Amino acid sequence: MKSLRKYSIPFTGLKLGKHQFEFVVDDAFFDEFEYSLVKKANLQCLVELDRQETMLILNFQIKGTVEATCDRCLAQYQQPLDITEQQIAKFSDEVIDEDDEIITLSKNDHEINIAGLIYEYINVAMPFISVCSNEGNTSSCDKEMLEKLNNLSGNDEQNEQTDPRWDVLRKINK
Protein backbone atom coordinates (compact mmCIF):
# COMPACT_ATOMS: atom_id res chain seq x y z
CA MET A 1 0.00 0.00 0.00
CA LYS A 2 3.02 2.29 0.15
CA SER A 3 2.92 2.88 -3.59
CA LEU A 4 -0.62 4.24 -3.24
CA ARG A 5 0.72 7.20 -1.21
CA LYS A 6 1.56 8.93 -4.48
CA TYR A 7 -2.20 9.17 -5.09
CA SER A 8 -2.60 11.55 -2.14
CA ILE A 9 -3.26 15.24 -2.66
CA PRO A 10 -2.01 17.54 0.11
CA PHE A 11 -4.51 20.38 0.33
CA THR A 12 -3.43 22.35 3.43
CA GLY A 13 -1.02 24.66 1.61
CA LEU A 14 -3.25 25.26 -1.40
CA LYS A 15 -4.90 28.62 -1.99
CA LEU A 16 -8.62 28.86 -2.61
CA GLY A 17 -9.44 28.12 -6.25
CA LYS A 18 -8.74 25.43 -8.83
CA HIS A 19 -5.62 23.27 -8.92
CA GLN A 20 -4.63 20.55 -11.43
CA PHE A 21 -3.07 17.18 -10.57
CA GLU A 22 -2.06 14.37 -12.91
CA PHE A 23 -1.63 10.70 -12.05
CA VAL A 24 -0.56 7.64 -14.03
CA VAL A 25 -2.66 4.54 -13.41
CA ASP A 26 -0.83 1.42 -14.56
CA ASP A 27 -0.21 -2.23 -13.67
CA ALA A 28 1.55 -1.34 -10.38
CA PHE A 29 -1.57 0.52 -9.22
CA PHE A 30 -3.80 -2.53 -9.68
CA ASP A 31 -1.20 -4.86 -8.10
CA GLU A 32 -1.96 -3.11 -4.79
CA PHE A 33 -5.56 -4.35 -4.89
CA GLU A 34 -5.57 -8.07 -4.15
CA TYR A 35 -8.79 -9.16 -5.87
CA SER A 36 -8.82 -6.63 -8.70
CA LEU A 37 -10.58 -7.64 -11.90
CA VAL A 38 -8.28 -5.28 -13.79
CA LYS A 39 -4.64 -6.39 -13.88
CA LYS A 40 -3.11 -4.35 -16.72
CA ALA A 41 -3.88 -0.76 -17.63
CA ASN A 42 -2.47 2.35 -19.23
CA LEU A 43 -4.54 5.27 -17.95
CA GLN A 44 -4.06 8.97 -17.31
CA CYS A 45 -6.03 10.52 -14.45
CA LEU A 46 -6.44 14.29 -14.40
CA VAL A 47 -7.87 15.70 -11.18
CA GLU A 48 -9.08 19.26 -10.88
CA LEU A 49 -9.31 20.19 -7.21
CA ASP A 50 -11.47 23.23 -6.49
CA ARG A 51 -10.61 24.32 -2.95
CA GLN A 52 -13.30 26.30 -1.20
CA GLU A 53 -13.66 27.53 2.39
CA THR A 54 -15.77 24.60 3.59
CA MET A 55 -15.18 21.89 1.00
CA LEU A 56 -13.10 20.42 -1.79
CA ILE A 57 -14.63 19.59 -5.16
CA LEU A 58 -12.69 16.94 -7.06
CA ASN A 59 -13.37 16.53 -10.78
CA PHE A 60 -11.87 13.36 -12.27
CA GLN A 61 -11.07 12.76 -15.95
CA ILE A 62 -9.65 9.26 -16.55
CA LYS A 63 -8.68 8.21 -20.10
CA GLY A 64 -6.79 5.28 -21.54
CA THR A 65 -7.04 1.54 -22.03
CA VAL A 66 -7.46 -1.49 -19.80
CA GLU A 67 -6.64 -5.06 -20.79
CA ALA A 68 -9.82 -7.14 -20.70
CA THR A 69 -10.82 -10.68 -21.65
CA CYS A 70 -13.47 -11.11 -24.33
CA ASP A 71 -16.46 -13.03 -22.95
CA ARG A 72 -17.18 -14.46 -26.41
CA CYS A 73 -13.80 -15.79 -27.64
CA LEU A 74 -11.61 -15.47 -24.47
CA ALA A 75 -9.00 -13.32 -26.27
CA GLN A 76 -7.21 -10.45 -24.54
CA TYR A 77 -8.01 -7.01 -25.96
CA GLN A 78 -7.61 -3.34 -25.09
CA GLN A 79 -10.82 -1.83 -23.66
CA PRO A 80 -10.86 1.97 -24.03
CA LEU A 81 -12.16 3.95 -21.04
CA ASP A 82 -13.16 7.60 -20.81
CA ILE A 83 -14.46 8.42 -17.32
CA THR A 84 -15.70 11.73 -15.92
CA GLU A 85 -16.66 11.81 -12.23
CA GLN A 86 -17.02 14.31 -9.41
CA GLN A 87 -16.46 13.89 -5.67
CA ILE A 88 -17.17 16.38 -2.87
CA ALA A 89 -15.21 16.42 0.39
CA LYS A 90 -16.51 18.63 3.23
CA PHE A 91 -14.61 19.89 6.24
CA SER A 92 -16.54 19.03 9.40
CA ASP A 93 -15.82 18.15 13.02
CA GLU A 94 -19.13 16.30 13.31
CA VAL A 95 -19.37 12.71 12.19
CA ILE A 96 -21.91 12.63 9.39
CA ASP A 97 -23.58 9.42 8.24
CA GLU A 98 -21.36 7.69 5.70
CA ASP A 99 -22.49 9.01 2.37
CA ASP A 100 -21.02 7.80 -0.90
CA GLU A 101 -21.41 11.22 -2.44
CA ILE A 102 -19.72 13.29 0.29
CA ILE A 103 -16.44 12.54 2.05
CA THR A 104 -16.00 14.08 5.51
CA LEU A 105 -12.61 15.57 6.38
CA SER A 106 -11.70 16.72 9.88
CA LYS A 107 -9.71 19.86 10.67
CA ASN A 108 -6.69 17.62 11.38
CA ASP A 109 -6.65 16.09 7.88
CA HIS A 110 -4.07 17.63 5.60
CA GLU A 111 -4.32 15.38 2.53
CA ILE A 112 -6.86 13.27 0.71
CA ASN A 113 -5.98 9.87 -0.78
CA ILE A 114 -7.86 9.34 -4.04
CA ALA A 115 -6.53 5.85 -4.91
CA GLY A 116 -9.74 4.16 -3.74
CA LEU A 117 -11.88 6.55 -5.75
CA ILE A 118 -9.83 6.00 -8.92
CA TYR A 119 -10.01 2.21 -8.43
CA GLU A 120 -13.77 2.33 -7.93
CA TYR A 121 -14.42 4.59 -10.93
CA ILE A 122 -12.41 2.33 -13.25
CA ASN A 123 -14.07 -0.89 -12.07
CA VAL A 124 -17.55 0.60 -12.37
CA ALA A 125 -16.77 1.85 -15.89
CA MET A 126 -15.75 -1.61 -17.10
CA PRO A 127 -18.46 -3.14 -19.30
CA PHE A 128 -20.60 -5.83 -17.72
CA ILE A 129 -20.09 -8.02 -20.78
CA SER A 130 -16.66 -7.60 -22.36
CA VAL A 131 -16.58 -8.21 -26.10
CA CYS A 132 -13.56 -7.52 -28.30
CA SER A 133 -15.73 -6.60 -31.30
CA ASN A 134 -17.90 -3.55 -31.85
CA GLU A 135 -21.72 -3.67 -31.83
CA GLY A 136 -22.08 -7.44 -32.08
CA ASN A 137 -19.80 -7.76 -35.11
CA THR A 138 -17.77 -10.93 -34.51
CA SER A 139 -15.16 -10.14 -37.18
CA SER A 140 -12.49 -9.20 -34.62
CA CYS A 141 -13.17 -12.21 -32.38
CA ASP A 142 -10.87 -15.23 -32.58
CA LYS A 143 -12.59 -17.32 -35.27
CA GLU A 144 -10.75 -20.53 -34.35
CA MET A 145 -11.90 -20.27 -30.74
CA LEU A 146 -15.49 -19.51 -31.78
CA GLU A 147 -15.53 -22.62 -34.01
CA LYS A 148 -14.23 -24.78 -31.16
CA LEU A 149 -16.87 -23.40 -28.80
CA ASN A 150 -19.62 -24.01 -31.36
CA ASN A 151 -18.46 -27.60 -31.89
CA LEU A 152 -18.42 -28.26 -28.14
CA SER A 153 -21.77 -26.65 -27.39
CA GLY A 154 -24.59 -29.05 -26.58
CA ASN A 155 -27.21 -26.97 -28.38
CA ASP A 156 -26.60 -28.35 -31.86
CA GLU A 157 -30.09 -28.62 -33.38
CA GLN A 158 -29.12 -31.32 -35.90
CA ASN A 159 -28.14 -33.80 -33.18
CA GLU A 160 -31.01 -32.88 -30.89
CA GLN A 161 -33.42 -35.77 -30.36
CA THR A 162 -36.88 -34.81 -29.22
CA ASP A 163 -38.56 -36.67 -26.45
CA PRO A 164 -41.89 -38.17 -27.71
CA ARG A 165 -43.59 -37.02 -24.48
CA TRP A 166 -43.00 -33.38 -25.49
CA ASP A 167 -44.53 -34.03 -28.91
CA VAL A 168 -47.77 -35.12 -27.26
CA LEU A 169 -47.79 -32.00 -25.06
CA ARG A 170 -47.18 -29.72 -28.05
CA LYS A 171 -50.29 -31.14 -29.76
CA ILE A 172 -52.44 -30.06 -26.80
CA ASN A 173 -51.81 -26.36 -27.53
CA LYS A 174 -52.99 -26.71 -31.17
Image: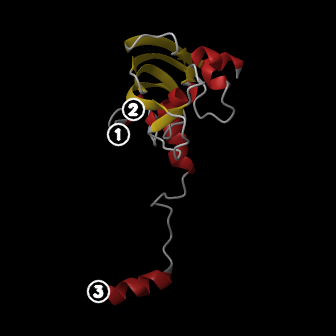
**Residues at marks 2 and 1 touching, judged by CB atoms closer than 8 Å:** yes
For the point 51% across and 78% down, which residue is it?
163
For the residue pair 4 and 79, the one nearer the viewer reads as: 4
Q: Which residue is under mark 2?
A: 133
Specify the quadrant that holds the N terminus: top right
The amino acid at mark 2 is: Ser
Residue type at mark 1 is Gly
Which residue position holds label 1? 136
- Residue 104 visible? The answer is yes
Can you tell which of label 2 and label 3 is closer to the viewer? 2
Extreme residue in the bottom direction:
172
**Earlier residue among tags 1 and 3:** 1
Q: Residues within 10 Å of mark 2 (few under 14, many from 20)?
A: some
Location of mark 3 (residue): 174
Residue at mark 2 to residue at mark 1: CA–CA distance? 6 Å
- Secondary structure found at label 2: loop
Which residue appears at 49% of the width and 26% of the height? 77
Q: Circle 3 sits in a helix, a strand or a loop, which is it? A: loop
Q: Secondary structure at mark 1?
A: loop
Q: Position of residue 168 (x, y in %)?
A: 42, 87
Badge 3 density bin: few <14, some 14–19, many ≥20, Cα 10 Å: few
**Residue name at image x 50 percent, y 62 percent:** 159
Q: Is residue 142 left or right of residue 52?
A: right
N-terminal-most mark, 2 or 3: 2
